[in-house]
Image (cartoon, rainbow, N blue to C red):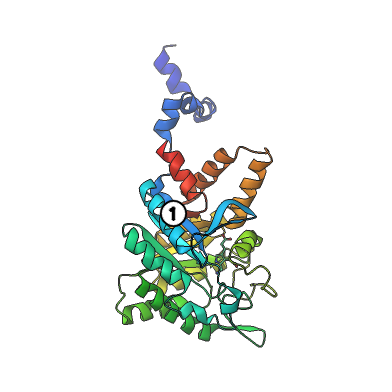
């Protein structure tokens, strides 16, 4: 029998059985050649924490290597981020307790620490994108993302407050407004408010699917809501059990004018990332939240895993799931590594 005849006589089953999927994994060059996804510095959004004052840097206990920064130091970090090629920062404030109240009114103050930081960063480093969080939780005395009346988070009044706050943040120079409160109707209201105030070019990144998660623990310490929050956020954040409902949430935000979608937390919700990307084909992001950062750092500090490899692998997983970018506290470290 000649070689050709032998091939022709093989059954499909025989051919499949003899397939060698390891063939392309045999060397570094061939693995690189067939690699499907890559993490680059362009994928990174760096969340930073702000405090009032001058030249102060406070480390957050459950987030080693992450600090609350005064505006002057935040500007320095923005300069460093720009040099590293990080496209954008996302800011989160820790507001003095005396300025927190029932309705989170300090969010409307043009000189609150968020707006001052935006102005200072955009003045010093105009080439870096500034993303501001529109949510009341750092500003309310009860740590909720909405206005609380008789034990109920009132939706429409909160949305009105957020829309006003968004205008203030845009006036300060924010490039992207990121509502993280999960009230109904806030994307449309914020879009209308921005357009009406002459900020048609300010984009909205919707925390479209934000789950009621245990992984926000260290963040609440960082912004000082941990000790204040009574009850939980289950009446407005999504149930971690629900994926179809997450798609409906995103659908609503898309209809109301969201430019970008975000999934939060990140790694435990990669199925949602994939579904949103497939369904809406919008720029899609995930937030690798404080608890995810803390887990990797804690295990690495104990010598239980290689922290650097776990960091890179976790971020690559977001790319594989369909993310265009990731909000991550690892951003500057990753950018340094990618630079070599
Ligand atoms: C609330 C908000 C949260 C985070 C950012 N903004 C969640 C919360 O406190 O309920 C979490 C970020 C993180 O954990 O890294 N608007």
The quadrant in which residue 170 appears is: bottom left
Relative height, residue 177 to residue 310 (above, below)? below
Residue projecting furthest to the front: 54
In this view of the protein, can residue 245 be seen by the observer?
A: yes
In the rendered structure, the answer to whether residue 201 lies left or right of residue 106 reads left
User: What is the crowding at mark 1: few (fewer than 14 residues within 10 Å), some, or many (at least 20)?
Assistant: some
On the image, which quarter does residue 58 sit in?
Answer: bottom right
Closer to the camera in the image, 125 or 208 = 125
Locate the N terminus by quadrant. Answer: top left
Taking depth in this image into account, of 258 and 137 the one nearest to the observer is: 137
Vertical order, 113 against 33 (above or below): below
Residue located 42% across and 32% down the image: 32
Residue drawn at (61%, 37%) of the image: 306
Residue furthest to the top in view is 1
Q: Relative to 8, does residue 53 appear above or below in the rendering? A: below
Please tell me whether mark 1 sits on a helix, a strand or a loop: helix
Q: Is residue 259 visible?
A: no
Is 142 or 24 nearer to us in this picture? 142
Q: Is residue 248 left or right of residue 294?
A: left
Q: Which residue is mark 1?
A: 77
Please provide percent x and percent y for residue 125: 34, 58
Residue at screen point 30% across, 70% down = 201
Residue 39 coordinates in the image, percent (x, y): 44, 44
On the image, the x and y values in percent for residue 36 come to 43, 40
Is residue 140 rendered to the left or right of residue 200? Answer: right
Q: Residue at x 66, y 88 (%)?
A: 150
């Amino acid at each position: 029998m000649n070689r050709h005849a032998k091939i022709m006589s093989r059954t499909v089953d025989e051919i499949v059985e003899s397939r060698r999927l390891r063939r392309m994994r045999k060397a570094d060059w061939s693995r690189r050649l067939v690699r499907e996804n890559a993490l680059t510095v362009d994928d990174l959004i760096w969340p930073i924490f702000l405090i009032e004052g001058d030249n102060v840097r406070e480390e957050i206990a459950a987030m080693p290597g992450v600090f609350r920064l005064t505006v002057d130091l935040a500007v320095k970090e923005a300069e460093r981020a720009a040099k590293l090629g990080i496209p954008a920062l996302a800011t989160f404030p820790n507001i003095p307790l005396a300025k927190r109240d029932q309705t989170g009114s300090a969010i409307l103050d043009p000189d609150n620490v968020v707006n001052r930081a935006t102005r200072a960063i955009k003045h010093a480093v105009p080439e870096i994108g500034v993303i501001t969080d529109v949510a009341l939780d750092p500003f309310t005395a009860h740590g909720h993302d909405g206005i609380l009346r008789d034990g109920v988070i009132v939706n429409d009044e909160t949305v009105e407050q957020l829309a006003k706050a968004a205008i203030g943040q845009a006036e300060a120079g924010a490039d992207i407004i990121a509502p993280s409160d999960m009230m109904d109707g806030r994307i449309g209201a914020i879009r209308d408010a921005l357009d009406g105030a002459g900020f048609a070019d300010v984009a909205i990144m919707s925390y479209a699917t934000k789950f009621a998660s245990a992984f926000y623990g260290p963040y609440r310490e960082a912004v000082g809501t941990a000790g204040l929050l009574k009850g939980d956020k289950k009446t407005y954040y999504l149930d971690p059990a629900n994926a179809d409902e997450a798609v409906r949430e995103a659908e609503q935000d898309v209809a109301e004018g969201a430019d970008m979608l975000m999934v939060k937390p990140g790694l435990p919700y990669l199925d949602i990332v994939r579904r949103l990307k497939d369904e809406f084909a919008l720029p899609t992001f995930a937030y690798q939240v404080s608890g995810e950062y803390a887990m990797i750092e804690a295990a690495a500090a104990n010598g239980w895993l290689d922290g650097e490899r776990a960091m890179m692998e976790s971020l690559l997983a977001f790319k594989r799931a369909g993310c265009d970018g990731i909000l991550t506290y690892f951003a500057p470290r990753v950018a340094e590594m990618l630079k070599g």
